[in-house]
């Protein structure tokens, strides 16, 4: 299986196309078992906060499409916040209200979209902040099986928020994709025996050490209540999942720990397939929000701890900005050589019961040193294979 990430503008709008094993990358948007997600679409026109005199920005680099009608009809639209560079009315209303597309967003974004009266209210839903004690805070979307005897797939969406985040910028959206199983999976997939219904949430110790998550399911501790044996059989089994974390402004890794423990481990969605996070650090005076984008500093922490296979830049466009709120804006570009060095130098502390020192060093070299740093231009595409 794979995920194709297409950058629709030079900023923070993406189209994700998840595909099962055997799908063609040229036609995978319509391939059975595929799933498409549109994230924070903003194609053209100004993005204004409160008033143009306060803050207004516009693209310098044109988007690769002029309308969302130029794309395949997405299965899902995700809105990470209500601000217009993430929830842009002129762009979003380019979607037909008669499509079956589901729109998921933060409470503020969902209320904003509903107020436009363009989409059916039932198609616009609020994404509740993730809470390990409330299973319904994980939004689960089933993918039909290839045949009546097949195993269905599933997409999960979770919103991870920050504490005391008055600006509402610093959150993350976690995405997992588990394709339906098929005969093709005999050759391309790796399976784990799981029930059709999601397993109960295992016990979580909030004080447990979580400085590193293993890149291999064989190193998952049995005490975590998770399956540890893989099977090469499609009957009554599920494939491993792909996982994406979208956090354009950044979020502290400490806020991601419960989500990683409760969902990514149980879904066999580690190591992280893709991290979508800013490379540039953007700051304002404290009274105007302080850190706007955490940049490479925040991204390195997440990429190291989750052994991200690819890190794709987001919110790094040098836009045309005007207004009182952006006069003191500071932008620090990332040094990619420094970022690569930080990722390669990372040495995770692994449990001595699970592996010896030589195996630890081998794993760190093979996983943490191989995070692909991808800076997509407008219209650029990157494919990650499972």
Image: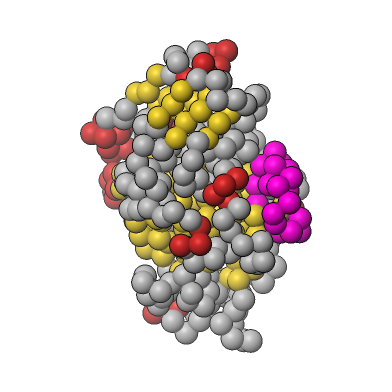
Q: Is residue 116 visible to us here?
A: yes
The one of 185 and 128 positioned closer to us in this rendering: 128
How many numbered discs sit on the rendered protein? Answer: 0
The one of 53 and 73 positioned closer to us in this rendering: 53
**Taking 25 as reference, is 48 above or below it?**
above
Give percent across and percent down for residue 238. Answer: 56, 71
Which residue sits at x=35%, y=41%?
A: 61
Give percent across and percent down for residue 216. Answer: 43, 56
Q: Is residue 106 magenta?
A: yes
Color scheme of the displayed model: secondary structure
Q: Is residue 383 magenta?
A: no
Give percent across and percent down for residue 292. Answer: 49, 26
Span shown in magenta: 104-123
Q: Classify residue 373 as left or right of residue 146.
A: left
Q: Quadrant of the C terminus?
A: bottom left
Q: Quadrant of the N terminus?
A: bottom left
Which residue sits at x=59%, y=86%?
A: 147
Q: Residue furthest bottom?
A: 148
The quarter holding residue 58 reads top left
The quarter holding residue 11 reads top left
Which residue sits at x=43%, y=19%?
A: 329
């Amino acid at each position: 299986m794979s995920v194709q990430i297409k950058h629709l503008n030079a900023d923070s709008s993406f189209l994700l196309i998840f595909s099962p094993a055997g799908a063609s990358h040229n036609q995978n948007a319509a391939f059975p078992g595929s799933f498409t997600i549109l994230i924070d679409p903003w194609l053209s026109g100004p993005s204004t906060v409160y008033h143009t005199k306060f803050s207004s920005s516009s693209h310098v680099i044109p988007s690769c499409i002029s309308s969302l009608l130029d794309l395949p009809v997405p299965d899902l639209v995700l809105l990470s916040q209500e601000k217009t560079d993430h929830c842009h009315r002129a762009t979003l209303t380019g979607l037909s209200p008669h499509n079956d597309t589901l729109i998921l967003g933060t409470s503020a974004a969902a209320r904003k979209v509903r107020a436009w009266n363009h989409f059916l209210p039932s198609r616009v839903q609020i994404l509740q902040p993730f809470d390990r004690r409330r299973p319904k805070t994980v939004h689960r979307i089933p993918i039909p099986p290839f045949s009546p005897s097949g195993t269905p797939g599933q997409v999960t969406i979770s919103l991870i928020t920050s504490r005391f985040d008055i600006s509402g910028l610093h959150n993350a959206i976690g995405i997992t994709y588990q394709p339906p199983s098929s005969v093709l999976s005999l050759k391309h997939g790796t399976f784990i025996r799981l029930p059709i219904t999601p397993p109960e949430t295992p016990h979580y110790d909030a004080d447990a050490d979580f400085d590193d998550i293993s890149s291999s399911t064989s190193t998952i501790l049995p005490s975590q209540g998770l399956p540890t044996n893989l099977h090469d059989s499609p009957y009554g089994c599920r494939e491993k999942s792909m996982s994406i974390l979208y956090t354009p402004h950044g979020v502290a890794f400490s806020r991601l720990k419960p989500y990683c423990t409760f969902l990514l481990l149980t879904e066999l969605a580690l190591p992280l397939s893709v991290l979508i996070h800013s490379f540039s650090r953007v700051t304002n005076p404290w009274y105007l929000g302080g850190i706007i984008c955490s940049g490479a500093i925040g991204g390195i922490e997440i990429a190291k701890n989750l052994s991200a296979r690819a890190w794709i830049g987001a919110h790094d466009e040098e836009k045309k900005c005007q207004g009182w709120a952006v006069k003191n804006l500071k932008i620090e570009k990332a040094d990619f050589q420094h970022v690569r060095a930080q990722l390669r130098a990372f040495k995770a502390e692994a449990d001595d019961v699970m592996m010896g020192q030589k195996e630890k060093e081998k794993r760190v070299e093979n996983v943490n040193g191989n995070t692909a740093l991808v800076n997509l231009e407008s219209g650029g595409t990157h494919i990650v294979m499972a």
